[in-house]
Image: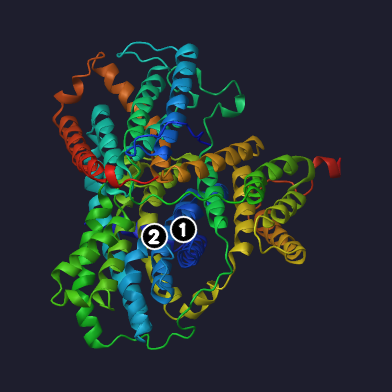
């Protein structure tokens, strides 16, 4: 079988000492930001992206990937021990995990969360390895209009599945697309919307944009309501890490179902870790013979979602690696990282850069193993990290981001961009907008435009081309149905709350 | 900043969403006009550089206008802002770094940026900020200069000459 040869290529890449080290650093950082509430994998990747600029592409991708799935492990520690989601995806873990901790079963909850994540991580890696090649072959037959339709579907699905206002999500996407237009037009070479400055000729720098919207805006949000932090760490010494056979039997089913669910939901555009964990919790509660235990320390409520979020985090790499299309903002940044390295993401990646492609996949296996070791015996260390005060942390984040932004192009103008988007990002949160669709639109913009222009050129300007190819038409219809499905209940509900509305 | 108008507004409309629409519609119109006047539109078959931006501007304006007629979502957070001092210090921090990095170099730029931005917190003390900025500067120089070999000079033009 080919797959073994491919995996061997991957192992060859990962077992190189330097790549192993980067994988470890990624997992370590991921766990740390997962544990710390207020800073997540998205912000961390945005900050560290420019730092990886000097690394070889393999090392850079391996490390950044480690941050994403490492954060899924770390997030559960905070959720279980202090009832605060260290990371948004572990919000549901806090419900039952914290109750378990109060009953003195913190060790078991942590162990099951880590082991479930480990199992899910291994399984999802296998899924990626098995399906990546068939998917790329399929993707190579896609025409420009198919790609266009696929991206439209991805954008629509990402809003439909996210929380918050659908309409504002759409506005954010379109604003992102528009900001993505800034810079030199690849077709005609003319400058677009650059306000007459050469500094914007290459477009708005993505790192400066991301750091502004995430780092600066998030820090300001944290400073709004500053109080002496008194985090109620339940147990500084966690004991009883070994789960009993009964615990393992009880959680086996939820782990298996969570893994399956996460692997599927992660592939969907707009999916990923968050959606997977919420769906898994709902599923387990429905299937459980004792649904009344949920919310009072049900082990299944920890095992299922924790497995699902890790599986989802990893399988969301599939569309990114095979199609070059990001299914969530983190993948959008990964694509940004690839492009900074001069690697073109897309279906040709597996043939052109097999070492990179399989190296990243195999690194997830190794990384998951490292994470179990990092998270279980060393849990006491991470608990200590929770006592670091925010007012020591945020100046460091600013300093790191500033160096990162500057290092990409050695251009002080990029820092002006960062400051401007910090203001914009903070303003948008005050208008109840999520920055995630903005970033997704920004990265997708140039690709979406390119495929649109190519499709229209091939069809001689006839927009009916989008309905003549079955794949294109199918994808667009699914997108339209999804959009109506989420908009209509919104309109109906809004009618109902019209009278209760208070500003 | 929204200006209060004399007449009572229908309760179904949220002031925050109207502000939202006003900001975004103006932005979309301005961008659309800018793109239309400076770029070639072309035809559907051979789109000029302005086709996509103008199309997006129109779409953005329409969507933003629609927001004005929807009520605020139930999950909306109450409006609360960071203090003016914090905002200026945090938002200005990248600018401070940008202004000093070339003339004074990495060491001073990082130290000054960290030192100033730390005062955005209510809990900052002079002693702690000095320690934090010194410690973090040493850390950054070690990581970025010696470990990662980033080509950013430690000392700037003004110092070395």
Quadrant, the C terminus of chain A = top left
Quarter of the image for residue A274 reads: bottom left
Q: Is residue A383 above or below residue A419?
A: below
Q: Nearer the viewer, mark 2 or mark 1?
A: 2
Q: Position of residue A101 (x, y in %)?
A: 37, 81
**Local SS, label 2:** helix
Quadrant, the N terminus of chain A = bottom left
Characterize the local packing of mark 1: few (<14), some (14-19) or many (20 or more) Cα atoms within 10 angstroms: many
Residue annotated with mark 2: A88
Q: Is residue B38 left or right of residue A253?
A: right
Q: Position of residue A104 (x, y in %)?
A: 36, 87
Q: Is residue A230 left or right of residue A274?
A: right
Q: Spatial distance from mark 2 to mark 1, Cα to Cα?
A: 8 Å
The chain ID associated with circle 1 is A
Upstream in the sequence, badge 2 or badge 1? Answer: 1
Q: Considering depth in this image, is A380 or A454 the residue closer to the camera?
A: A380
For the residues bearing labels 2 and 1, Cβ distance under 8 angstroms: yes
Residue at 51%, 51% in the rendered image? B80
Residue annotated with mark 1: A40
Residue at 44%, 64% in the rendered image? A15
Is residue A115 visible in this depiction of the protein?
Answer: no
Residue at 19%, 69% in the rendered image? A285
Q: Position of residue A284 (x, y in %)?
A: 19, 69
Q: Is residue A381 left or right of residue A376?
A: right
The chain ID associated with circle 2 is A
């Amino acid at each position: 079988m080919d797959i073994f040869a491919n995996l061997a290529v991957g192992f060859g890449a990962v077992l190189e000492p330097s790549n192993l080290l980067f994988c470890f650093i990624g997992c370590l950082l991921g766990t740390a930001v997962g544990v710390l509430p207020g800073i997540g994998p998205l912000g961390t990747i945005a900050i560290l992206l420019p730092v990886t600029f000097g690394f070889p592409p393999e090392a850079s991708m391996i490390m950044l990937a480690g941050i994403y799935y490492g954060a899924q492990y770390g997030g559960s520690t905070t959720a279980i021990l202090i009832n605060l989601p260290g990371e948004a995806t572990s919000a549901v873990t806090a419900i039952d995990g914290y109750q378990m901790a109060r009953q003195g079963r913190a060790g078991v909850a942590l162990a099951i969360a880590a082991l479930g994540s480990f199992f899910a991580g291994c399984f999802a890696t296998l899924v990626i390895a098995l399906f990546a090649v068939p998917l790329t072959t399929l993707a190579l037959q896609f025409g420009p209009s198919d790609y266009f339709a696929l991206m439209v579907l991805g954008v629509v699905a990402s809003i439909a599945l996210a929380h918050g206002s659908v309409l504002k999500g759409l506005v954010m996407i379109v604003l992102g697309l528009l900001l993505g237009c800034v810079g030199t037009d690849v077709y005609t070479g003319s400058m677009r919307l650059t306000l007459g400055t050469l500094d914007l000729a290459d477009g708005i720098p993505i790192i400066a944009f991301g750091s502004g919207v995430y780092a600066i805006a998030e820090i300001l949000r944290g400073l709004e309501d500053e109080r002496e932090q008194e985090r109620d760490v339940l147990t500084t010494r966690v004991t009883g890490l070994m789960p009993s056979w009964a615990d393992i039997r009880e959680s086996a089913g939820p782990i298996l179902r969570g893994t399956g669910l996460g692997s599927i939901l992660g592939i969907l555009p707009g999916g990923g870790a968050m959606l997977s964990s919420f769906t898994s919790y709902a599923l387990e509660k429905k299937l459980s013979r004792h649904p009344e235990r949920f919310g009072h320390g049900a082990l299944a409520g920890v095992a299922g979602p924790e497995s699902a979020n890790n599986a989802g985090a990893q399988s969301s790499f599939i569309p990114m690696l095979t199609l070059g299309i990001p299914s969530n903002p983190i993948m959008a940044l990964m694509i940004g990282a690839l492009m900074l390295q001069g690697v073109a993401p897309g279906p040709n990646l597996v043939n052109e850069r097999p070492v990179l492609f399989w190296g990243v996949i195999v690194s997830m296996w190794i990384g998951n193993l490292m994470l179990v070791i990092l998270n279980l015996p060393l849990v006491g260390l991470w608990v200590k990290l929770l006592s670091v005060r925010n007012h020591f942390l945020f100046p460091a984040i600013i300093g790191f981001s500033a160096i990162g932004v500057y290092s990409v192009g050695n251009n002080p103008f990029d820092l002006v961009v960062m400051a401007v988007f910090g203001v914009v990002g903070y303003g948008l949160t005050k208008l109840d907008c999520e920055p995630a669709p903005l970033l997704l639109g920004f990265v997708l913009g140039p690709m979406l435009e390119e495929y649109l222009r190519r499709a229209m050129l091939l069809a001689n300007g006839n927009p009916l081309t989008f309905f003549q190819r079955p794949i294109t038409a199918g994808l667009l219809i699914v997108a339209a149905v999804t959009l109506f499905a989420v908009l209509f209940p919104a309109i109906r509900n809004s009618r109902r709350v019209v009278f209760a509305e208070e500003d | 900043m929204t200006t209060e108008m004399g007449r009572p507004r229908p309760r179904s409309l949220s002031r925050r969403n109207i502000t939202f629409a006003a900001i975004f519609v103006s932005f979309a119109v301005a961008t659309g006009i800018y793109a239309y006047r400076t770029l070639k539109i072309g035809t559907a078959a051979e789109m000029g550089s302005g086709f996509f931006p103008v199309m997006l501007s129109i779409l953005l304006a329409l969507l933003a206008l629609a927001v004005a007629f929807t009520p605020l979502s139930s999950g909306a957070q109450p409006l609360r802002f960071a203090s003016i001092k914090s905002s200026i210090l945090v938002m200005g921090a990248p600018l401070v770094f940008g202004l000093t990095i070339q003339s004074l170099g990495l060491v001073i730029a990082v130290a000054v940026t960290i030192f100033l931005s730390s005062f955005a917190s209510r809990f900052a003390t002079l002693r702690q900020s000095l320690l934090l900025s010194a410690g973090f500067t040493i850390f950054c120089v070690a990581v970025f200069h010696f470990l990662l070999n980033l080509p950013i000079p430690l000392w700037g033009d003004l110092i070395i000459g």
